[in-house]
Image (tube, grey):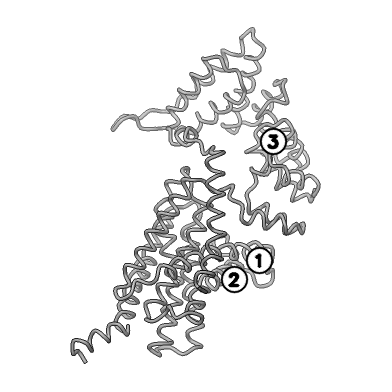
Amino acid sequence: MKRKIIFGVLIIPLVLFLFYFIIQNTSQQTIDTQGVRWKLTKPIERERILFREFVSGSKSLDLHYRIINNHYKIPLVYSVGKRKVERRDDNYLKSFYSTLSFSKDSILREISNFGFGRIAIEEKTFHEATKYFNDVKNINAKYVNWSRFQIADAYKKSINEKIDYLKKEVDNNGALDLAIPIYYNFLRHKGQDSLINDIVQNPKYNSYISLVERRQYNIESGQFKEYFKLLFCISDINLYGFIISLIIAFFWTYYVIYVDIFEKGVVFDILTCLILGFYLYFLNIICIDFISKVEFPLIEFYLFGNPMIKTSILFFLQEVIKIIPLFLYLYFTKSVNEPYDLLKYASLSAIGFNFASNLNQIDLNQLIFLPNFMIANPIISISTSATIAYLYILYKYRTSINLFLFCILAIIIPLVINIVYYLFSTGEHMVKLFFLIPLFVIIISNWKVAINNTINISPFLQRIYISIGGF
């Protein structure tokens, strides 16, 4: 009866969460596949599509911003077929806007000035851009004030002037996706709380600000009710990300259970551990949000631009939080009856934790990072928790280490794994990923050793030996 009550308390909020998520995604499913297909289309093909749209009669500056922005994403030299290469032709684009400048239609002449201005910005000739945008009469058009902001930023104009351009772009309902994040950061820098609050509280604007930044603002302003609403917000979760995250969690759960050759475990215990790991992810987010506000000016040092003291504290707390279900099972249930159970429940908690983490990160625009989400992240998450579990096995069953050494190693080893992975898996230089190969080799080899050792000291194996006369 107690098990049913505990399971009900854990599963009902999760079921309601998933039900609400599915309703939201089916009623306002604007994960538009057209947008995804567009992002996967090569810039050369996009250019043809955009020009066809102009020929069909569109005169929006939005379209021409997209034409020019897309054109300069084409590499200067690109391959066509197996052996042939071509150079990007910028002259035809300039000729096109030059032709528009002689048109009798004032709108087309406006487009010409805008087009040449945007070309100048892309080519970093900001004095030319200034001249063309001074001739653009419709200062309220989308991307005009955004372009003027880019010019002001290039000339390192005052922050007030840049804020003024961004405010006009936002007020004119212009390039909100580009203007609002920068506008918001400038307002934070200037401490203009009333304007910040207007953006954060306005659904039309706040979707362009990350949930992390909005939660940080709620902490600073003492709006804790709003903070906890955002903590469990599902606006950044999409159906595709949910399905992929679920598949990843299922695969690793199956693997961890499959390795247990003696006793696969009770479904109740497995699901409860996964759900606990899922919930504890949100406790970890709270720790991150609050500790991120703390500074360590006297002892802080940086590595690859990362504050290592703060990062180390956050990773330490993350591992403490992830391992909570294991010790709940160990001291409050009878589910742990062999050494591998410690590895199993530590790993299941990490899988639930990783599932929650993936929900907000995976979408179809990040398919290139899918191997990272499917393999690298789960391995790191599982290995750090399993390391603590295995060290406890060495302390409890093998007496290879004492309690003090267990505590020291349980802090240091997961911390080193997390920091090495964090430092070499983030940043612009993908070449750093090659430095992670030794880390994964060490993790996998030690995982095999841990499994073999826990099987060898399992009471189930000893019973088998006894039953066949092995002892």
Question: Where is mark 3, residue-wise?
Answer: 149
Position of 28 compared to 163: left or right? Answer: left
Amino acid at circle 1:
Ile
Label 2: which secondary element: helix
Q: Going from the N terminus, do you reach mark 2 or mark 1 first?
A: 1
Q: Going from the N terminus, do you reach mark 3 or mark 1 first?
A: 3
Where residue 13 sits, quadrant-wise, is: bottom right
Label 3: which secondary element: helix
Position of 439 compared to 363: left or right? Answer: left
Question: Where is mark 1, residue-wise?
Answer: 291
Cα gap from disc 2 to disc 1, whole angstroms: 9 Å
Label 1: which secondary element: helix
Amino acid at circle 3:
Phe
Cα gap from disc 3 to disc 1, whole angstroms: 34 Å
50 versus 271 height, above or below: above
Depth-wise, is mark 3 or mark 2 nearer the camera? Answer: 2
What's the mark number on residue 172?
A: none
Question: Where is mark 2, residue-wise?
Answer: 313
- Residue neighbourhood size for the residue with mark 3, other residues' Cα within 10 Å, grouped as few (<14), some (14–19), many (≥20): many
Position of 424 compared to 255: left or right? Answer: right
Find out whether the residues at labels 2 and 1 contact each other: C-beta distance under 8 Å. Answer: yes
- Residue neighbourhood size for the residue with mark 1, other residues' Cα within 10 Å, grouped as few (<14), some (14–19), many (≥20): some
Can you say which quadrant of the picture contains the C terminus? bottom left
Q: Nearer the viewer, residue 111 or 374?
A: 374
Depth-wise, is mark 3 or mark 1 nearer the camera? Answer: 1
Q: Position of residue 103 (x, y in %)?
A: 61, 9
Q: Position of residue 83 (x, y in %)?
A: 29, 32
